[in-house]
Image: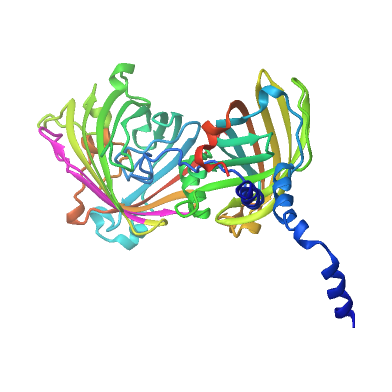
Amino acid sequence: MLCYYMRKLLSRLPLRQFAGLLFVLPGLLFLLPDQPETRMHDSQEGIVYYTRSGRAEFTSRVPLHTFTGESDNLVGMIDLENNVIDFYIDLRSVETGIDRRDRDMHRTLSLDEHPFAEFTGALESPVELVSGNEKTVTAVGEFTVHGVTRDVRIDGTLILQDDNLLLEAEWELDIEEYDIEPPSFLFLQVNEIQEMRIEATMEPRPREEILGNNDS
Amino acid sequence: MALFFLFGWMGFLLAGSALAQLPREPVQEDRPVYNVFWSSKNVGISTVRNPSEGSLNTSVLHTFGLVDGGESRRGIDQFFGLDDGANTRIGLEYGITDRWSVGIGRMTFNKVVDINTKANILRQTTTNSMPVELAVKVMLGITTRPGQGLEFSDRLSFFSSVMVARKFDRFSLQLAPMVAHFNRPEMAGLVIRPEDEYQDQLFGLGVVANYEFNDRFSLGAEYLPVIGDRNAGTQDAMALALNIDTGGHIFQLFFASSQWHNEAFVMANNRDRFWKGDIRFGFNINRVFGIGR
């Protein structure tokens, strides 16, 4: 009985006239922003902020000792217009100051197979950047290291200064979540929590120049 | 019109499916070859290895008496040389850059203090754009044994070597022509006899080899013949070593003919022959501290 009334109702609807909506609606949706909007100046349209020489550090702790690994080869892009953040680093460029320890790190992280640590995501909420003012932001996305990807939230700050975007962020990384076995030396084991820190001065560049054919 | 909306569909689907990503590019393809040798000294011969910038390599080297007991030929009486006084050298080397270090050491025999510096002129690279390592080491030795009644300059010795090395997969080989000069030959610990000849200047060719079984163990060997005129009664030195990488330390357990701990004194005053059974047990410990970080 229910089916009968539904068929009757549908037969009275002018579906032919509305069929075009099946095409129109997605077209309109495409025109709408699908991610949080970041307020920008007109001059920022079509540009992304980019670096090839950002600094990345991690701090590891073993009992009675702390050491730091550093690299100035952090590569990244922040596209405020489309709210896309993408960073990566070739972990083979990270140095701890002792080449033997670097080699152990390379082995632990299986860098021959998985040389990059990478983050791809977006700002969690819109941000309006005013030159000289520091803004606290949260990035959400996927962080990959050792071939394992996890969802992460990373807090950081952005400052627009002299047309450049200054970025700083710190977070803690539990290497066991990425199937990394904490290295051990004799009876001492490296703490599984690594303190991560990045900073970069990012220059405005045309989006097409940076992303080329990778811009989807 | 229909085409416009078709593209609308496609755009809508693509916008939600992927974020723009930078192409992942490696930083540097051509890197220095790692671990041509595991420590800055094999047993008694320096290698091309330098501590990296800002790191301090500490080393303690010991060589005991003859395993066979020496003249008594009763090794057990001297517990295979361990009851004989060991020659011990404590050394520090600091990496000013990744290619240049300065160091100081002091050994028991003759109370010799040495001040040295080593520079890597060339580094072997992974792509073979540079096929060899080339390093230069110079050293000033000061014999501080008291009661000699000598001028300070008489106590000085000088040493220089050029080390050329290459790592072939797991096997490393180094050739190191070297020269040593003693202002007074007796400062090398020689007992001078009028009927014998002694040299102020000595030339040698250090040969060092290392084979890695895995990341933790390797077998090393070295041979140091004196080229040309030599001090009376001296012999070419040889050693075999097992290197153990514990993760924090490099231990070297070795059998060597010479009890001296730097090349100048090995060339000047080694009197033992490895293949005739003049073998001493010894061990070296190397530990690197990253004091720059």
B104 to A94, vertically: above or below: above
B169 drawn magenta: no
Question: Which is nearer the eye, A39 or B222?
Answer: A39
Question: Where does the C terminus of chain B fall, quadrant-wise?
Answer: top right
How has the structure been colored for display?
rainbow
Position of A159 with respect to B206 (left or right) is right
Is residue B21 shown left or right of residue B135? right
Percent x, y of residue A38:
75, 34
Front residue of B114 and B250? B250
Residue sitting at x 65%, y 35%? A79
Q: Is residue A170 left or right of residue B54?
A: right
The answer to whether A40 is drawn above or below residue A185 in the figure is above
Q: Residue at x 32, y 45 (%)?
A: B43
Tell me if residue B223 is in the magenta stretch: yes
Percent of width and height locating residue A6:
86, 74
Q: Position of residue B72 (x, y in %)?
A: 25, 57
Give the vertical position of A78 relative to B207 (above or below): above
Asked if residue A34 shows in the view, the reply is yes
Query: Image quadrant of residue A167?
Result: top right
Region of the chain picked out in magenta, as a range: B218-246
Q: State the predominant SS element of the stretch in magenta.
A: strand
Res B148 → quadrant: top left
Residue A78, located in which quarter of the rendered image?
top right
Q: Residue furthest bottom?
A: A1
Foreground residue among B266 and A204: A204
Task: Give coordinates of residue B114: x percent, y percent.
Answer: 37, 29
Residue plotted at (89% across, 76% down)? A5
